[in-house]
Image (tube, helix red, strand yellow):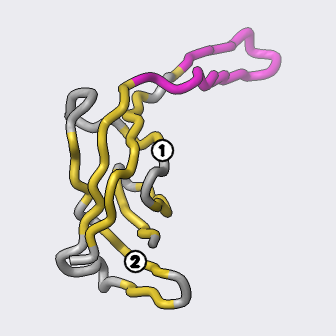
Amino acid sequence: MYAVVKTGSKQFRVSQGDKLKVESLSAEAGEEVSLTEVLMLGNGESFTVGAPTVANASVSARVLSHGRGPKVKIVKFRRRKHHRKQAGHRQNFTELEITAINAG
């Protein structure tokens, strides 16, 4: 069984036992979280598509850790103008392990 969930303005296709990195959640490591925005449920050949979400469906996950992604470099450069500007950004993330998919 698999589900398509929305969290942090991104969509992920998950099944039980999967590990994924999502945008930062306000939960401590080891806590259980419930992802309630389930857009689609699938089981083999059959699937259920929500409008926009599947009613009473949720995905349970355990928070494994929090971290920061790789540095993304931003460079702004104007030729012949003696202008160069650099910046960097590291996005925070939360690593989740999917424990159960509840069809509702």
- Residue 93 at what x, y percent from top left? 41, 32
Viewer-proximal residue, 94 or 102?
A: 102
- Residue 29 at what x, y percent from top left? 27, 27
Viewer-proximal residue, 85 or 37?
A: 37
- Residue 73 lies in magenta, yes or no? yes
Image check: 37 left or right of 85?
A: left
- The residue segment tinted magenta is 67-88
- Residue 57 at what x, y percent from top left? 24, 73
Point out the image quarter for the N terminus.
bottom left
Above or below, 70 against 37 in this view is: above
Q: What residue do we see at 21% from left, 35% from top?
A: 31
Residue beneath label 1, please?
A: 19
As drawn, which residue projects farthest toward the top?
A: 82
Above or below, 29 against 83 in this view is: below
Point out the image quarter for the C terminus.
bottom left
Residue beneath label 2, please?
A: 41
Q: What residue do we see at 37% from left, 34% from top?
A: 94
Secondary structure predominantly adopted by residues drawn in magenta: strand
- Secondary structure under tag 2 reads strand
Image check: 53 left or right of 23?
A: left
- Residue 53 at what x, y percent from top left? 28, 77
Q: How crowded is mark 1: few (under 14 residues within 10 Å), some or many (20 or more)?
A: some
Q: What residue do we see at 66% from left, 22% from top?
A: 75
Mark 2 / mark 1, whichever is N-terminal: 1
- Residue 12 lies in magenta, yes or no? no
Q: Which amino acid does label 1 sit on?
A: Lys
Which numbered dot is residue 37? none
Above or below, 55 against 100 in this view is: below
Q: How far apart are marks 2 and 1 (CA)?
A: 18 Å
